[in-house]
Image: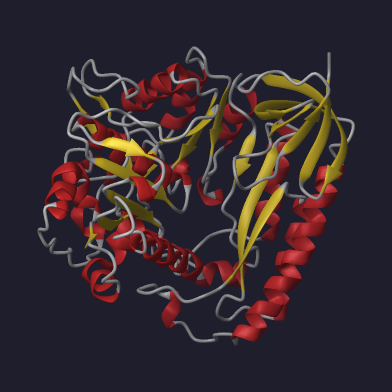
Amino acid sequence: MPSSAPSGRRVALVTLGCARNEVDSEELAGRLAADGWTLVEDAGDADVAVVNTCGFVDAAKKDSIDTVLQAADLKGLGRTQAVVAVGCLAERYGEQLAASLPEADAVLGFDDYADISARLGRILAGDVHVPHVPSDRRHLLPLAPVDRQTGVRSVPGHGSVERPDLPEGMAPASGPRPLRMRLGGGPVAPLKLASGCDRRCTFCAIPSFRGSFVSRRPADVLAEARWLAEQGVREVVLVSENSTSYGKDLGDLRLLETLLPEIAAVDGLDRVRVSYLQPAEMRPSLVEVMTSTDGVVPYFDLSFQHASGPVLRRMRRFGDTDRFLALVEQVRAAAPDAGVRSNVIVGFPGETEADLAELERFLVGARLDAVGVFGYSDEDGTEAATLGGKHDEAVIRERTERVTALADELVAQRAEERVGETVQVLVESVIGASGEGRSAHQAPEVDGTTTLHGRVPAVGRIAAAKVVATDGVDLVAEVLG
C-alpha cells in the first residue's frame, strides 16, 4: 500500500516464503513508512529493493537467490540503486551469503530490523554494510521459557512503538502498539502469534535461525487483530512456528484456549484460523475451543511429517499411525466437517518400504483435506544430515511421486465427499457472475479454493453455498438464497 513521503526515498518490499515472512515484511514497511519512506510495489520504481528471503529448503533458497539477482538486474536501468537481502536466508547465512552473492548491496539480519531505515539510508549513501556472522539464535534467550519475556531481543513481527505521528494506515498509534503496515489488500491477513521453536526435529534448521519459542503478549495480539479488522480484514490466520506452545513462556500453556474466543469477538472479524499445530502438543481443551467457538473455524493444520513410529523417532518426534488416526477421529467427532491438513516427508534416512507402507496406511485412514508431500533433503547444520541410511535421489524421487499420487487421489475423494454439503465461503474475488473464495476448511494458498456461481456477494462477505462439483481439491458451489 503506497504512502507519501517528503524525503522522496522509495522502497519496494518483495516477500518470499510463508505467511510469517509476510508479517515480517509488513513490520519493515511500517518502520520505513514511519520514517518517511514511500512504499512502492514494483522494484523498478524504488531506490532500494528489499527482498525478504526464505531459507527453509533448497528450492526456496534458490528462488530467493534468483529473486535477488532479478532485482539486481534492474540497477542502472531506472531508479533502482541498491538491492538488499533480508529474511531467513539472510539471517541463516549472513556473511556467507554476502560473499557468494555480490549482486546484493547488503545482507541484513534480524537484529538490523529495528533500525532498518538508517541501514537503508546508509546503503544508498554508498556505505558498505558489514554482514553479521551467523550464530544459533537459540542461545540469545534464557533456556527456561518463563524467563524469556524479559530477555527478548530483536524478534521479527514482535516490534512495537509509542509514536503519535504514524502515517495513516498503520497500526494504532496510541500507546505501545505493534508496528505494521499492510502491503496488500483483501479480506484475509496473517497475524503473528509467536516466533521460534523449542522442538529439536532432526530435519529442521528453523530454530537455529528463528530462535527459541517466544509468545507475543495477548494484549498485543488483540490490538493488532482490532487494527486489522479496521483495515477491512475479515479473517485472521494465526501464524507461528508452533501455535500449540503459545503461552508456555507466559506461564499458561492453555492461554490459546483463552485468547481464541477474545479474538473471535473482535468487531468486524468473521473468522479466526489457527495454523501450525503440533500433534504431540494437542490437548482436548484446545480441540474443544477450536470446534465449538463461534468465529473460530474448525481447521486443524497438524504437522504429522510421517506416520511410522521408527521414522518419527529418528526425526525426534512422537506418535504413530494409530495415535494420529485417533486424534483425527477426536477432531471429527467434535466437528464432522472440520478441515484437517498436514505435510509429510518421504525418503527420510533409514525409511524402509514397511515405513512407507505405514505412512500410506495413515493417509488412507485419515482422509485429510490437503497434504503436502516433500522429498527429504539434507539441511545444513541439522542432525538428520549426519544420519546413516541415506537414500539415493532416484529412490527419494520415486517415493515422493508415489505418495504424492496417493495423496492427490485421497484429497480429491475427500473433496467429493463434500458434494451436497452447505459451506460458508469467504468471498475473495468476483468476476462477472462468479466468484472465488475459501470454505472454512480451506486456508489461504495451501488448501484449494471454492468457486461460486449464482448471486455472489461482495468481496469480504461470507456466502452460504451448496457444493455441486469438485475439481481435485477445489470445490464448485452454488450460492444459496
Colour setting: secondary structure
**What residue is rendered at 71% in x and 31% in y?**
334
> Residue 310 at what x, y percent from top left?
59, 72
> Residue 247 at what x, y percent from top left?
37, 36
Q: Which residue is nearer to you in this view: 44 or 416?
A: 44
Instruction: Determine if residue 159 is in view.
Output: no
> Residue 175 at what x, y percent from top left?
21, 18
Instruction: Determine if residue 259 is in view.
Output: yes
Q: Which residue is nearer to you in this view: 69 or 413?
A: 69
Q: Quadrant of the C terminus?
A: top right
**What residue is rendered at 83% in x and 31% in y?**
477
Q: Which residue is nearer to you in this view: 35 or 465?
A: 35
Quarter of the rendering containing residue 166: top left
Residue 321's place in the image compared with 413, above or below, is below
Which residue appears farthest toward the front when viewing the image?
A: 77
Quarter of the rendering containing residue 463: top right
Residue 419's place in the image compared with 386, above or below, is above
Q: Is residue 145 left or right of residue 456?
A: left
**What residue is rendered at 83% in x and 18% in y?**
480
> Residue 457 at what x, y percent from top left?
71, 18
Q: Is residue 260 left or right of residue 103?
A: right
Q: Is residue 328 left or right of residue 99?
A: right
